[in-house]
Amino acid sequence: MLAVKTYPADYVASCRDRVHALLDAYSGSDAFEPLFCDHVVLALDHYFVHRQRGMEGKDGNPANEVRLLAESIAENDGVLRADKQIRLDPAASVLGLAAGDPIRLGVDDVRRLAGAYFDEIGRRFV
């Protein structure tokens, strides 16, 4: 699969339900929470990994934010990296992180991020 222009609404809803069920099932541990949350962000990105970048936009929206977070978690030791093509404004982003910031997320952070991300995917790709 090279690139996806649309996702069925029921697929987006199913992914949203799975993420919320996972976050609801989390029982809490200070050491485990950031690792758990990193992997939820990776799952969020993977659900829609083939989304077309042109349709996603480059304005720093929640889909951009998840893309940058996932790439930074997987490839930059959990430090948010800048992307010259995406205008991520920390003041307007969901999590308020800037390039160079360490990514240490809690369940509430990921819940907010996931909500905004699924809403953005729904607006742009359904």
Image (cartoon, rainbow, N blue to C red):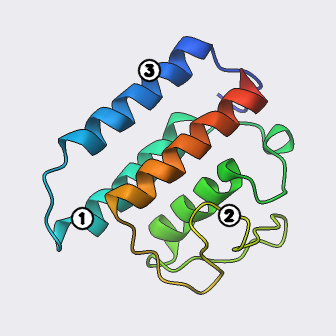
In the rendering, which numbered label is found on residue 14? 3
Asked whether, in this view, residue 43 is left or right of residue 81, the answer is left
Cα distance between the residues tagged 1 and 3: 23 Å
Check contact, mark 3 vs mark 2: CB within 8 A: no
Q: Position of residue 117 (x, y in %)?
A: 60, 43
Give the crowd class for mark 2: few <14, some 14-19, many >=20 residues within 10 Å.
some
Q: Position of residue 4 (x, y in %)?
A: 72, 27
Cα distance between the residues tagged 1 and 2: 22 Å
Report the quarter where the C terminus lies: top right
Q: Residue furthest bottom?
A: 100
Provide the secondary structure element on which disc 1 rests: helix
Q: Which residue is mark 1?
A: 33
Q: Position of residue 48 (x, y in %)?
A: 58, 35
Q: Is residue 8 visible?
A: yes
Q: Quadrant of residue 98?
A: bottom right
Instruction: Report the residue at 60% width, 45% height from top.
Output: 116
Q: Quadrant of residue 51?
A: top right
Check contact, mark 1 vs mark 2: CB within 8 A: no
Query: Observer-nearest residue: 33 or 83?
Result: 33
